Image: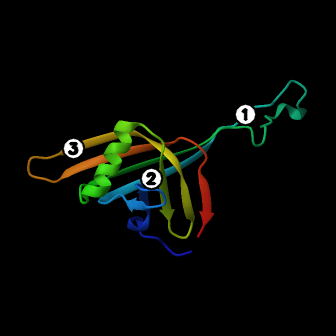
């Protein structure tokens, strides 16, 4: 696998059913996939090594991004998703890795701007249900 450009990672939000709009203006984005572990160790465990219960932990995904305002349509969808606090469907495209898709809540939405600079935003998404994965 060759090096990938960060700008090729896409974050999309579903507007109409099955229609995804790319969140425009993102300059940085991070996707974190997590799985909690469940400790099933007891006093009889050989050598006193920890034993983890496979498949028992809670999986989650978190996404964060920062950027500049560039597109009124995607800005409106993100803003509505925050104020509605409904689990909107999001699609995360990571080149040469895969596509993650499922419901996320907008956990944080921040706006900022310098007097002589552009208006910026930052957002954080938290998974709100099962996230599907398809390899590319």
Do labels 2 and 1 touch, CB within 8 Å?
A: no
Query: What residue occupies the far top of the structure in this picture?
Result: 43
CA–CA distance in space, label 2 to label 1? 26 Å
Quarter occupied by residue 73? bottom left
Quarter occupied by residue 14? bottom left
CA–CA distance in space, label 1 to label 3? 40 Å
How dense is the environment of label 1, judged by Cα within 10 Å: few (below 14), some, or many (20 and up)? Answer: some
Report the front residue among 131 and 28. 131
Q: Which residue is located at x 9 percent, y 47 percent?
A: 115
Residue 30 is labelled as 2
Residue 19 x %, y %: 44, 61
Q: Secondary structure at mark 2?
A: strand
Q: Secondary structure at mark 1?
A: loop
Mark 1 vs 3, N-terminal side: 1
Residue 21 is labelled as none
Please determine whether, in this image, residue 3 is positioned above or below residue 132: below
Report the front residue among 39 and 43. 39
Q: Which residue does the numbered mark 1 point to in the structure image?
A: 38
Residue 18 x %, y %: 49, 60
Report the front residue among 13 and 42. 13
* Quadrant including the C terminus: bottom right
Q: Which residue is located at x 29 percent, y 59 percent?
A: 25
Q: Please give the count of numbered marks on the rendered protein.
A: 3
Mark 2 vs 1, N-terminal side: 2
Judge from the rendering whether residue 97 lies leftward or rightward of residue 75; answer left or right.
right
* Quadrant including the N terminus: bottom right
């Amino acid at each position: 696998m060759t090096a990938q450009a960060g700008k090729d990672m896409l974050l999309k939000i579903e507007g109409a059913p099955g229609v995804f709009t790319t969140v425009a203006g993102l300059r940085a984005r991070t996707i974190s996939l997590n799985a909690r572990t469940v400790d099933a160790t007891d006093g009889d465990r050989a050598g006193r090594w920890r034993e983890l219960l496979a498949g028992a932990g809670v999986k989650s995904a978190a996404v964060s991004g920062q950027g500049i305002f560039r597109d009124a349509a995607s800005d409106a969808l993100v803003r509505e998703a925050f104020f509605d606090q409904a689990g909107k469907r999001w699609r995360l495209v990571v080149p040469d890795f895969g596509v993650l898709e499922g419901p996320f809540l907008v956990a944080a939405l921040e706006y900022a701007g310098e007097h002589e600079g552009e208006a910026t935003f930052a957002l954080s998404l938290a998974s709100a249900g099962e996230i599907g994965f398809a390899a590319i």
